[in-house]
Amino acid sequence: MFHLRAAGVSLVLDTRGTASVLHWGPDLGDIDLSAPAFVPAVPPSSIDVPLRLSLLPSLAEGWSGRPAIENGHGFRTAEAHHQDQTLVVRSASPDATQEVVTELELTPQGVLRVRHRLTNRGDHEIVLPSLDVLLPIPAEASELLDFTGLWSHERSPQRAPLRHGIWSRESRHGRPGHDDAFLMVAGEPGFGFRRGRVWAVHLAWSGDKRIWAERSALGPSVLGAGELLAPGEIRLAPGGSYETPWLVAVFSGSGLDGLSDRLHPWIRATSPLSLPRPVVLNTWEAVYFHHDLTVLGQLADAAAEVGVERFVLDDGWFTGRRDDRRALGDWSVDDTVWPDGLHPLISRVHARGMEFGLWVEPEMISPDSRLARDHPDWILDGGAGPTWRWQRTLDLTRAYDHLLERLSALLSEYPIAFLKWDHNRDLLTPGVAHRQTRALYRLLAALKDAFPHVEIESCASGGARIDLGILPLVDRFWTSDTNDPLDRQSIQRWTGILVPPEYLGGHLGDGVAHVTGRTSALGFRLATALFGSAGIEWNLTRASPQEKADIAAWIAEHKRLRPLLHSGRVVRADSPDPAHLVHGVIAPDRAHAVFALVTLGTPAAALPPPIRFPGLDPDRSYTVRPIGVPPRTMQDAPPPWLAAGEVTLPGRFLSEVGLPAPLLTPEQALLLELA
Ligand code: DGJ
C-alpha cells in the first residue's frame, strides 16, 4: 500500500494483487492503511469478490465499463516502488508478453499525473487498439462540466448530470480542435467557481484523443482519457513500446478556482516563461495580406509610440502568398514584396526598441506552391479529400528535415525573437495523428534546442491547439481568433481554468470587431485584454489621438501591473446574475490585487449583486480604487464609495459582503485595484 500526500490531496494505491487506486481526493491525514477501509461489499449477481478498479481495468477482473485496453487481458502487478512523489508500478499480462509500467506522480501542488508505457515482451507484433488511463471518482461527483466550441468561439462550457453510461468526448481533428473537451470535470451538483468538490482530468496531448466520465450500476464512477488510436496505428514489434500522454488529474475541495490553484502554480513551475511578457502588436487584423514596407513601417512607428515591445509580422510575407489560396510551404521571403528581405522592416522595428516576430504554418502545404510541385508525395492524403482553407497537410515524417532546414535558415538569417506557429486545418487523414503529433513535438524541441532564445506561440485558427502536451515546447497560446471582448470574456475565463493568464494571448482589436462585426467601447476592449499576454491587433495608424493616448495609458498600466497579473492567484466570483462577472488576480502575499467587474448583457435586476472579492486576506485592510477607462453607467447616482474615489475596508468584509456595484450598461468593465 502506498499513500502519497501533497497540498491537501491524497492518493492511495494498493499494489497487492492487481494495483488499484483506492482513493484520489482530499487529504486523508495519517491513516492506517491496513484497516479494511476501502473494501466494498459483494452485491448479488456479480463476481464473488469485491470489485476493484485496477490501474488497467478489464473484463478479466470483472470490470464491464470501458477498459484501459480494448480486448485487454487481466494484468497482474509484478512490482511497485516509490521514487519521491512518484509511484512506479510494473504489471504483466498473464502470458507475460505485454508489460505495462505505470507512473503516478503527485506534484507538490497536488496535481496528479499518470501515464502508462506498454512494451511488447513477446515474439510477435502487437497491434495496440487503445491504452487509456482511468481514475475512480466518488458517487457524489455526479455533475459534469466539459467544453465544446467553434472557430472564434472556443471553450464554450456545457454541463449535464452524469447518469449511468458514458459521456465520452472524442477529438479526431489531428489537433485538439475548436470543440476540444479540454477538461472533463465531475463534481458535486451545483459546483461553482468557489464551491463544491470537483475532480477534473485533462490529456496532455495535441492529437486525436478521447476523454470521458462513466458511471455504472455495477462499480465506481471513473474519469478516463487516452489517445484515440486508429485501427493499426500503433504496431509494436518485439521489444517495442508505446507510451501514453500524461493524464493530468486535479481535485479541488473548493470549486473550479481550486483547480486553477493547483494547475497554475504547477504550470508556472514546470513550463516557466521568460517574464515580463512583452506587449505585442500583431499585424493580421491591421493589414491582412497587404504587406507593404511603408505601411508596416508606419505601423511599427505607431506601435512603438504607444509602448509595444514586440512587433509580429503575420501571414503574407513569403513567396507568392498574396492571399490564403497558395504558397504554404514556400518558406522564403517574397522578393517581389520585400526586395531587400525582411531586413529593412526588422531594422525599423529594432530601431524603435521592439523585438521582431514572424508567423509561420510549417505543417501545411498549398497545392499551389513550389513545394507541392516538387514533393507531391509529402502531402498527407496524397491530394485526395477536400482542401480546407485551400490547403493540405504535410506528412511531417517526410518533410521533417526540410522544415527544420527552412525554419533554421530563417531564424539564422533574421533576428527573430518569436514565431507564431499556426495550424489552420484538421488532418482528415485516418491513422496518422499519432506520428504527426510526435513529429511536431520533435520539430519544436529541435528548434528550441538550436534557437533557445526564440519564443513560439501555439496558434491553430485561434485556440484549436491549447493543451498541456504542447505547452512545454511553446511560450504562448493564441487563445482565439476573435478579438471581440464580449466573446473573449467567456473564452478567456474558461481557458484560464487550466492555463495561467500570462500564457494566453489577448489582443485589443478594432472598435468594430473583425470577426463578429460587433461594436465595443474602447474601455471594455482594454479591460478585457489587460490580464493575459497583452497585445494589439488593430491598424493603429488609423486610431484617433485620443484612442492612442488611451492605449498608451493602458499599456503603461499593464506594464505596471503585469508582475502581479502574471504571478498571482486567479479568482472568479460565483454570480447570481450570468450577465454580471467578477474576476481578479491576487498577489501571492495577498497585499495587492486587481479585479474586474464585467457586464456581459443587461443586468437581471435594477440593483446588481454586490462586487465580492474572493481570496483576499480576511485580516488585512484594503483600499479599493478604480483604474483604467471609466465604464459607461446608467445610474442616477453612483455608490458613494465609488463617488468618493476609493474606500478602505477589511478583506473579510470585501470577500464576504462586497461593495455595492455601480450600474454599468451592457458590455462594460470596471477595473479595481486593491492594495
Ligand atoms: C489564423 C490565425 O489564428 C490568425 O491569427 C492569423 O494568423 C491567420 N491564421 C493568418 O492566416
Image (cartoon, rainbow, N blue to C red):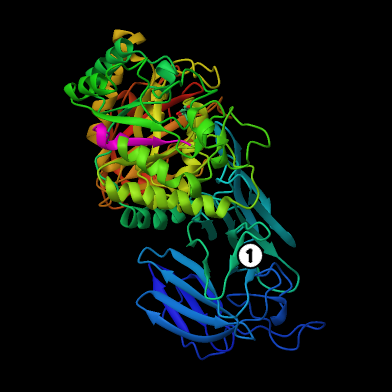
- Looking at the image, which is closer to me, 33 or 449? 449
Q: Mark 1 points at which residue?
A: 130
CB at disc 1 and ligand 1 closer than 8 Å: no
**Residue 461 seen in the figure:** no
The spot of residue 380 in percent (x, y) is 59, 42
**Residue 54 seen in the figure:** yes
Relative vertical location of residue 428 with respect to residue 253 in this rendering, above or below: above
Quarter of the C terminus within the rendering? top left
In the image, which residues are magenta? 410-422
Q: What element carries label 1?
A: loop
* Residue 100 is covered by the magenta coloring: no
Q: What amino acid type should be assigned to the residue bearing mark 1?
A: Ser
Relative to 454, is 361 on the left or the right? right
Occupied quadrant, residue 428: top right
The total number of labels drawn is: 1
Instruction: Name the residue furthest front.
Output: 374
Q: Residue at x 22, y 17 (%)?
A: 305
- Looking at the image, which is closer to me, 197 or 250? 250
Q: Tag 1: Cα neighbours inside 10 Å, few (<14), some, or many (≥20)? A: many
Q: Residue at x 66, y 81 (%)?
A: 74
Relative to 36, is 674 on the left or the right? left
The spot of residue 603 in percent (x, y) is 55, 27
Instruction: Name the residue furthest right.
Output: 45
Relative to 590, is 149 on the left or the right? right
The spot of residue 557 in percent (x, y) is 25, 29
- Looking at the image, which is closer to me, 540 or 124? 124
Relative vertical location of residue 296 with respect to residue 627 in this rendering, above or below: above
Q: Which residue is drawn at 30% across and 16% down?
A: 339
- Looking at the image, which is closer to me, 187 or 470? 470
* Residue 413 is covered by the magenta coloring: yes
The spot of residue 586 in percent (x, y) is 32, 46
